[in-house]
Image (cartoon, helix red, strand yellow):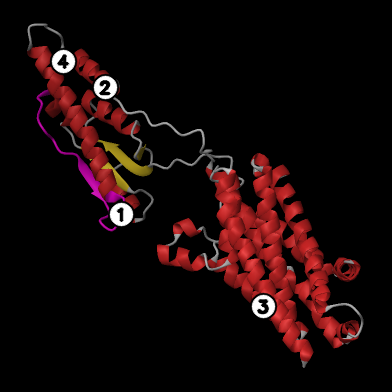
Amino acid sequence: MRPIVVIALKDLTQLVRNRMTFLFLLIMPIAFTLLFGYAFGGFSTETPDPRLPVGYLDLDISDGSRQLGELLAGSAVIRLDENQARSASDLESLVSEKDLAAAIVVPAGYGEALLKVEALPLVLISDPGNTASLSIEREISRVATRLANAALTARIIADSTSGKAFTPAMEDALTAWQTPPISIRVTQSELIEVQDSATMSLAHTAPGMMLQFAIASLLTSAQILVNERKTRSLQRLMTTKTARWQILAGHFLAIFTMLFMQFTLLIAFGQLVLGLDYLRLPFATLFMALASTACLAALGLLIGTLAKTDEQAIIFSLIPMFLFAGLGGAWVPLEFTGEVFKAIGHLTPVAWGMDGFKNIIARGLGWESVTVPVLALFGYGILFFTIAAWLFSRSEER
C-alpha cells in the first residue's frame, strides 16, 4: 500500500506545480459555465412569453370587435400586438419580415353582423411556410366561434319573453363561457420538481462543462507518465520491488484524487453560486461524483499509457474531450436530438454522467434514477483500466 501512496503523492505534487492543472481544473469550467449559462438565458430574471405574437387591426371599432379583442387577448396560444401597424399593408410587411407570426384584421361591419347573428369572416394574414400558422388559425377560429355562439345565445334570450336586452345577454353568455359546467384541471405531481427556464439552462450547462473539462484536465496527468518514460524514471522504478499493479494503482489514485477535488469544488460552485440543488439528494450526487471520477481517472490512465510524447498526450486528451462532450450531450441536450443520435450518444460515458446529474438537479427524480448511470460509469471505468493495464504490461515487456 505504501508504494501506491508514495507514487500518488509524487504525481499530485507535480500536478499542483503545473499551472495548466488549475486552468483545466477550475478556471475554464467555471468560465465556460458562466459563458454558456449567460448565452442560453441561465441568468435571466425575465419570464419569457411563450405565446405567438399576432398583429391585430380593428377597422370596425364596435362592441363586437372589442369583445373579440378581449377574448383573443386572453388566449394561451397567441399574444396580440396592436401597436406595430396602422394598416393591413403594415401587417403584411411585419409578417413577411417575421416580426409577427401572423396578423388579424377585423373588417368594418363585424359588430353589426354579429348583432344579426351573421358570419363576417376575419382577415388572417399569415406565412404559409410558418409551421405555427395552422395553430394560429385554429385558435382564431375557436375564439370567433365562441363569440358567434355567445351572440346566438344572446339573440335567443333577447327575442324571448324575458325582454332582456341583447348587450347584457351577450355579456352574460361570454361570462358563462369562462365558467363552464365541466372543466379539466391539470396538476403537477409533487415528485416532479418544476424548474424555470433559467435554472434548466444552468442545470444542463454546469454538469456538461464539469464533465468536459474533467476530460481536458487529463492532459496534465497523462504528461506525467510521458515524462516518466522520457526521463527513464519509470524504467528505474520497475527495477525495484514495486509491482506493476502498484505503479498503475498509484497513478490512478493521483488522477482520481485530482478529479474528485475538481468535481467537489464545481459541485459546491453550482450549489452556492448558481443555485443548483445538488444537495437535494446528497448521496446520489456523491455516488455520481465518485463514478464519474473513477471512470475518467481510468480514461486518464489509458491516455497516459497510450501516449509516448507530449504531443500525443495533448491529442489523446482533446479528441475524447470533443468527441465525448459533443456526442454525450454536454453541449446540446440529447432530448433535443433524434433517437439514433441519442443512442449513439449513450455509447459515451459523458451521456451517462449528464443523465445522472440532470436527474438530480433538473428532473427532480429520486435516488434510484442514478443507479443505471452510476453502473454505466463504473463499467466504463473498469473497461478503461483493464485496457490500460494490458497495454502497460505489453509495452514494458519490450
CB within 8 Å, label 1 to label 3: no
Q: At numbered mark 3, what does the secondary structure look like: helix, strand or loop? A: helix
- Which is in the foreground here, disc 3 or disc 2? 3
Residue 122 belongs to magenta span: yes
Query: Residue at left 76%, top 58%?
Result: 260
Which dot marks residue 166?
Answer: 4
CB within 8 Å, label 4 to label 2: no
Which dot marks residue 131?
Answer: 1
Q: At numbered mark 1, what does the secondary structure look like: helix, strand or loop? A: loop
- Kind of residue indicated by mark 3: Ile
Q: At numbered mark 4, what does the secondary structure look like: helix, strand or loop? A: helix
Neighbours of disc 2 within 10 Å: few (<14), some (14-19), many (20+): few
> Quick one: label 1 or label 4, which is nearer the N terminus?
1
Query: Residue at left 48%, top 42%?
Result: 48
> Quick one: label 1 or label 3, which is nearer the N terminus?
1
Magenta segment, which residues?
A: 115-133
> Quick one: label 4 or label 2, which is nearer the N terminus?
4
For the residue pair 324 and 238, the one nearer the viewer reads as 238
For the N terminus, the image quarter is bottom right
Separation of residues labelled 3 and 4 (CA atoms): 84 Å
For the residue pair 93 and 32, the one nearer the viewer reads as 32
Separation of residues labelled 1 and 3 (CA atoms): 50 Å
Q: Which residue in the structure is indicated by mark 2?
A: 180
Tell me if 243 is positioned left or right of 306 in this view: right
Neighbours of disc 4 within 10 Å: few (<14), some (14-19), many (20+): some
Separation of residues labelled 3 and 2 (CA atoms): 67 Å
CB within 8 Å, label 3 to label 2: no
